[in-house]
Image (spheres, rainbow, N blue to C red):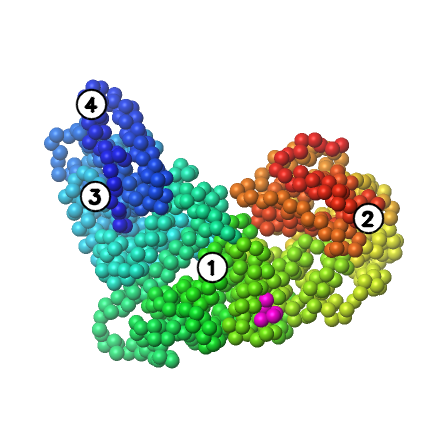
Amino acid sequence: MTSPRIANQRAIVERRGLAVAIGDLVAEHGAERSRPKVVALLRGALDAGRAEIARRLADKPSAGTECAAAQAFLVDQLVRVIYDHVVGYVYRASNRSTGERIAVLAVGGYGRGEMAPHSDVDIAFITPSKQTAWCEQVIEAMLYFLWDLGLKVGQSSRSLDEMVRMARGDLTIRTALLEGRYVWGDQDLYDEAQQRFWTEVVHGTERQFVAEKLAERNERHKRLGDSRYVVEPNVKEGKGGLRDLHTLYWIGKYIHKVRDASELVDVGLLTPAEYRAFRRAEAFFWAVRCHLHTITRRAEDRLTFDLQREVATRMQFAERPGKSAVERFMQLFFLHAKRVGALTGVFLAQLDEQFAKRQPRGLLAGFRTRARSLKGYRVFGGKINVPGDDWFAQDPVRLIEIFALADAERLEIHPEAMRLAARDAKLIDARVRKDPRANALFMDILTSRHDPETILRWFNEAGVFGRFVPDFGRVNAQMQFDMYHHYTVDEHTIRAIGLLARIERGELGSDHPLATQILPKIQSRRALYASVLLHDIAKGRRGDHSVLGADVAFKLCPRFGMDEAETELTAWLVRHHLLLSATAFKRDLADWKTISDFVEVVQSVERLRTLTLLTIVDIRAVGPGVWNSWKRQLIGEVYELSEERLRLGHAEHGRAQRVAAKKGLVGEGLRGEAGLVDTIGAQLSDAYWIAEPEDIIAMNLRQLARARGLPLDVATEYYAARGATLVTVIAADHPGLFYRIAGGIHLAGGNIIDARIHTARNGMAVDNFLVQDPLGRPFMEDTQLARLRTAIGDALANRVKLTPQLAARPLPRARAEHFPVRPRVEFDNKASNRFTVIEVNARDRPALLHRLARGLFEARLIVHSAHITTYGERAADTFYVTDVLGEKIAETARLKAVERQLLAAAAEETIEVELA
């Protein structure tokens, strides 16, 4: 768009010297016989040019636009040399007719004079009329030379009439020709093509082009995730990326015939400050794109996890306390993407205004809707605007007021007002932040019953949010370098607030029945919404973000106008916002002490309700697919057990009554087979009756009755209530049974998300597993269920070598190896009265649970239940264990030995020995 001057061009490629060398080869060997040597010379020039450009990029890692311009220059020179060689030696025509003329045009990105190191070479060959044999020969010969150099060529060859006809009917062709640039050949023919393009194609189609271009942009955004905050962005095609900048330039060029992006200022579509932001974003994205191509040696535009760290290193980003170099790099990436979004908004608004002024004055001109005034603001066409350029300067609180009014009146904010808000956001200082009116307006926005998500996103886009709440500004565009979090911290937070508002409006009743039911019962909406805003506010700082976030809440809530009780509740929620999910996903909910410990921290039903709501929207806003029916079930279970304990104060001495009540419910469910409760059920301990839900107990009893006398019985059933597949294994209990069953399930492609291990009084094991596929879906097909049963049978009969086969399986998540996860083992002897609780954090990989279970077996421990949680590339597996005598593990030396065993199991090396 604005090609920088290329320093020392001859160091990249010396065209005249190359042409002379080719001429010498032709003189010595002839045009045909010298062709391989000519190709070798050209390829040498291309490789040397690329190497020089890569060296310059390494010396000046932010010089993306210079790199892009140099690459286009290199290709220009090679195309010129090839054209001269073909026309001068290969198909020499001394007396050409007027039809035997060719203009070589660079189009698309190449036409702008911008190319990443491995971009396609987009060329258009224009001829005066229908192609002659000579024209066809020259074009074909040129293309073969370019292909022989290994260049990927996008080419078209058309007559002037064909060019006009096809450009009229095809937006892609029109856009490519819009950037058509003369490279070589017949200059007069190029000039004629340009003149006809502007008069016969462009003239009168300006509105249509803008509409089609914006529709194309929206479709592209939708295809790539429709958010500029996806954690693996596409630097070229993604929202807020290079293509969005190109779209602004194309529109400006199509309507105003600008030859350079700087002229967008002259025609009133951007201000000088906005143009500077345009250039900064463009330069940054080009640098990233050129580094991506250089690293991968191909046309790679996706900034994937495995490349982010490398690009950050090449662009010389350094670590800071609490933030890695790659997180700092990606934060700058998203800040630029955000700025591009804001530029697009004001650019299109300005364009709207210009089109509106061009409307012909007709009979109905006087009947246009009149603007109205709202507290001094202008409201017209559903948009709220400011009355003058100094409106915010007169009273900076208006920078918050305009967003509050837009929410209250259900209006859009006029892009001109957004432009001024972005410009004047710096007027928000300590005085404005402390202003009670400003804070009251902000709380109105945050707790709005309309659409706080949209308003807060505009608030953030304008840069006002980060100025008014500087702690929020610190997490603006901040990513977390892992495979669990899909969005930047600010985007995640705003989405969570939006989800809470939608639940409150009753829009997500089927997805979140519990949340929909309890939200109307809470006493402090303000504390709830404030806790969602602040729960991740301290991410990226050195220390526990929950603890640091609670400190921020104590500081900010009084400023927001919240009273002492609201402040206390908000800070408590932020401090403990991970407690409910950790209890639900990592602890045995059948263990009486699990709920006792949780309730001891929670202490009131109001806290329980608000914490449950915060937990639900926090998990759901992490990204698509993270929330599922299994998590909903577990969180619901914790809520119900805790609410009952808080309300009725049940104590552990009710164990016998609970078992009796459970047996009664199971008997009702079994109907005609109710006798199984007293016969088969007598073999099962009280711990079993408390641990398992009634429907699973009924299934287990029927299976035990069927399996009498059999050495092994495996049942598999889709379990809709938990969004998983229930696998029940009944076999003679023996050491190592659990790890072998786990290995068989992994071998069949299953992931275990929960396991309960029981031994009946007759020595038979009754093991219940909940299983999903690697994408978190249940096994439902008959063939899948049969595969599970066969694999478990083979594993228990020792018909397969588990460890080598499991080690050969691919990682559950591609590119997970690029994330450092240090294995960690934690012991907790207070979480349960009967068991030692062991939590292992490690990289999620094939059959991790199998390896850990085997490690526990080798440490001579008995596993009673296992609870498996994954956070992207990280797995957190929790085991409730005892020694072989049924006692907790308490001695320090024994705990250290178990830790070593589990760390070895979690480590990356494959264990070669297969136990008998």
Horizontal relation, residue 346 to residue 790: left or right: left
- Mark 2 or mark 3: which is in front? 2
How far apart in space, not on screen, are marks 4 and 3 (Cα)? 28 Å
Element under label 1? Answer: helix
For disc 3, the marked residue is 182
How dense is the environment of label 2, judged by Cα within 10 Å: few (below 14), some, or many (20 and up)? some
Q: Position of residue 462 (x, y in %)?
A: 39, 64
The answer to whether the residue labelled 1 contacts the one labelled 4, judged by CB atoms less than 8 Å apart, is no
Which of the two labelled residues, at mark 2 and mark 3, occupies the earlier sequence position?
Answer: 3
Which of the two labelled residues, at mark 1 and mark 4, occupies the earlier sequence position?
Answer: 4
- Number of the label disc, if any, that sits on residue 887: 2
Residue 838 visible (yes or no)? yes
How dense is the environment of label 4, judged by Cα within 10 Å: few (below 14), some, or many (20 and up)? few
The residue at 11%/31% (across/down) is 95
Which residue occupies the foreground of this view, 103 or 774? 774
Residue 568 sits inside the magenta stretch: yes
Amino acid type, label 2: Glu
Magenta part of the protein: which range? 567-571
- Mark 1 or mark 4: which is in front? 1
How far apart in space, not on screen, are marks 2 and 4 (Cα)? 90 Å
Farthest residue to the top: give it.
28
Which residue occupies the foreground of this view, 471 or 226? 471
For disc 4, the marked residue is 24
Amino acid type, label 3: Tyr
Which of the two labelled residues, at mark 2 and mark 1, occupies the earlier sequence position?
Answer: 1
For disc 1, the marked residue is 474
How far apart in space, not on screen, are marks 3 and 1 (Cα)? 47 Å
Amino acid type, label 1: Arg
The answer to whether the residue labelled 2 contacts the one labelled 1, judged by CB atoms less than 8 Å apart, is no
